[in-house]
Image (cartoon, rainbow, N blue to C red):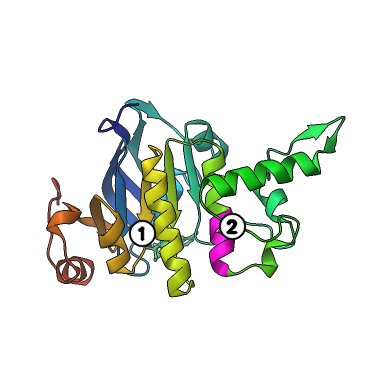
Amino acid sequence: MSSGELLVEMRGICKRFGGIQALDSVDFSLRGGEIVGLVGDNGAGKSTLIKILSGVYGPDRGEIKIAGDPVRLYGARHAKRLGIETVHQDRGLVPNFTVSANLHLGREMTRFGLCRVKKMERAAREALESLGIEIQSYSTPVMSMSGGQQQAVAVARAVAANPKVVVLDEPTAALGVKEVNKVLDLICRLRGGGVSLVFISHVLPEVLSVTDRIVVLRRGKKVGDLPTSEADQDLLVKLMIGTEVVGCERS
Ligand SMILES: Nc1ncnc2c1ncn2[C@@H]1O[C@H](COP(=O)(O)OP(=O)(O)O)[C@@H](O)[C@H]1O
Ligand SMILES: [Mg+2]
């Protein structure tokens, strides 16, 4: 897939949970090499939209095309096979597993049915170092690491599968300033490696600093889709909580 081509096209996506319309006919697209920010107030539907893209939930209505082909995603594994890796808001790490074990979760290296611990540790080190991440010990449980380092392990695991699309759901929530900057650096480095990204955050300066385009959700509806160069914090806040709409083909 060359840069600029449509990698992901979601159209008319609807999702209801009981009495709540979490998504109401949302369109979302992502091109090769693009970083799209997805913003919105709490409960706007951001996580639900990317859970549909990553095969966790099926949509009630709407269609998804990946690299131009209409798909029905049968679970998270299917989405991964199609090159979509997601770091969910809860990171999905196993707290008492080591860095290495977390990195290889579900794709352990084995010989005669046994895990190849040293080989896995070496691979984990290479994966993290290639992303510029330093970890003191690959054999300590991730729960003893800082939030930023855990986030880095979760991102490294997503990237290790060599995906076309990486989705990061609130990767900087609960991190200190220094750690946030590391995660933002990492995002820029991933883009340099040709990966397309969806970056979800409600910290607007972060979104404005790393994205090419920003999509705004408000109560399950898309109310903004604009180049980052045309966005500022004031406008985004108005879109998130006000009544304005910018750059959406459909109401
Ligand atoms: N599994 C679920 N069951 C019931 N309601 C849900 C579920 N997931 C999300 N919701 C609801 O859907 C709406 C959108 O949630 P979510 O996508 O998590 O928003 P955001 O990520 O933008 O904060 C919220 O009102 C939320 O309470
Ligand atoms: Mg969320």
Horizontally, is 223 left or right of 141 in the view?
A: left
Residue 180: x and y in percent read 43, 67
Residue 41: x and y in percent read 31, 69
What amino acid type should be assigned to the residue bearing mark 1?
A: Gly
Q: Residue placed at 47% from the left, 74% from the top?
A: 176
Q: Residues within 10 Å of mark 2 (few under 14, many from 20)?
A: few
Asked if the magenta segment contains residue 146, the reply would be no
Question: Magenta part mainly helix, strand or loop?
Answer: helix
Can you identify the residue that label 2 sits on? 134
Q: Residue placed at 59% from the left, 57% from the top?
A: 134
Horizontally, is 232 left or right of 12 in the view?
A: left
Can you identify the residue that label 1 sits on? 45
Separation of residues labelled 1 and 2 (CA atoms): 34 Å
Number of disc labels: 2
Q: Residue placed at 27% from the left, 48% from the top?
A: 25
Residues under numbered marks 1 and 2 in contact, where contact means CB atoms less than 8 Å apart: no
Q: Is residue 17 visible?
A: no
Indicate if the residue with disc 1 has its beta carbon within 8 Å of ligand 1: yes
Name the N-terminal-most of marks 1 and 2.
Answer: 1
Q: Residue placed at 76% from the left, 56% from the top?
A: 139
The answer to which image quadrant residue 219 occupies is: bottom left
Q: Nearer the viewer, residue 156 or 199?
A: 156
The answer to which image quadrant residue 95 occupies is: bottom right
Residue 188: x and y in percent read 37, 51
Q: Secondary structure at mark 2?
A: loop
Asked if the magenta segment contains residue 151, the reply would be yes
**Magenta residues (range):** 147-153
